[in-house]
Amino acid sequence: MSEALRPMSRQRLYEQVIERLRNYVADAGLSAGDKLPAERELAQRLGVSRASVKQAIVVLEVQGLVEARHGGGTYLVRDTLDIEPVERLVERRRRLPDVLEAREALETKLAELAAERRTEADLADLRSALDHMRAEIEAGDHGVEGDRRFHAAVTAAAHSSLLAEFMQSIAEQVTESRTESLRQPGRPSRSLGQHVAILDAIAAGEPKQAAAAMRRHLRTVAKVRLLAWNPDEEPG
């Protein structure tokens, strides 16, 4: 059957709530750090269930646009609520577990090899990447570029052309997983600390410790709110 005649998607109720919240933030001139109305108030004013509002907040949290503080309300992290289309989130959620699995398999081995083969120039590149990520975090950013540089430097230090080609083949998906992970609250600083542990093991020439440190890091990377989100849950 032609794809043109596939069933039409129906906008989920929480997507409509998100759109209303986006307009509200713009109309009210809210910015990062400002508090949204309470879920109960939003539900009453929008004429929907609290569960629908809660699901909308979850989607905004997944995208790093708001922070829901336990017992303290929901606060804007950005100046707008311009979100990705939900269907794009759904697609990324579908492929993310495979990407994370591939990263653990490849990068654990790369860290092991790096500990065996690294040169002084490789160690300098790794330290430079850490310095860059640290500076990004101190400036209030997520450290995405520093993170990219660090993992690229580990790959280079392994001196394995074929494994490097494998990493390059999934570069786009790795970028997605990196961005997803580093926008989790508190994650940039934690990742930086884990990078230091990886570098220490590589510099010490300890392959098993380097592999273990990389594995621990990537399992932290895998803990993202997106994977706990059920996009098909439609509250009443």
Image: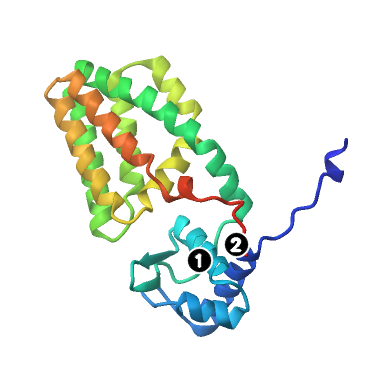
Q: What amino acid type is highlighted by mark number 2?
A: Pro
Q: Quadrant of the N terminus?
A: top right
Q: Nearer the viewer, residue 151 or 109?
A: 109
Residue holding disc 1: 54
Residue holding disc 2: 235
Q: Residue at x 24, y 47 (%)?
A: 190
Q: Quadrant of the C terminus?
A: bottom right
Q: Nearer the viewer, residue 59 or 48?
A: 48
In this image, 188 relative to 8: left or right?
A: left
Tell me if residue 214 comes above or below residue 57 in the rendering: above
Q: Residue at x 33, y 35 (%)?
A: 218
In this image, 53 relative to 122: left or right?
A: right
Badge 1 local density, few (<14 within 10 Å), some, or many (20+)? some
Under tag 1, what secondary structure? Answer: helix
Tell me if residue 117 comes above or below residue 176 in the rendering: above
Which is nearer the N-term, disc 2 or disc 1? 1
Under tag 2, what secondary structure? Answer: loop
Snapshot quadrant of residue 61: bottom left
Q: Are marks 2 and 1 in contact (CB under 8 Å)?
A: yes
Snapshot quadrant of residue 205: top left
Measured as percent of width and height from the top left, residue 181 is found at 38, 46
Snapshot quadrant of residue 44: bottom right
Res 132 seen here: no
In this image, 47 relative to 33: left or right?
A: right
Tell which tag, 2 or 1, sits nearer the viewer.
2
Measured as percent of width and height from the top left, residue 165 is found at 45, 21
Res 118 seen here: yes
Identity of the residue furthest to the front in this view: 236
Q: What amino acid type is highlighted by mark number 1?
A: Lys
Measured as percent of width and height from the top left, residue 170 is found at 49, 30
Marking on residue 176: none
Badge 2 local density, few (<14 within 10 Å), some, or many (20+)? some
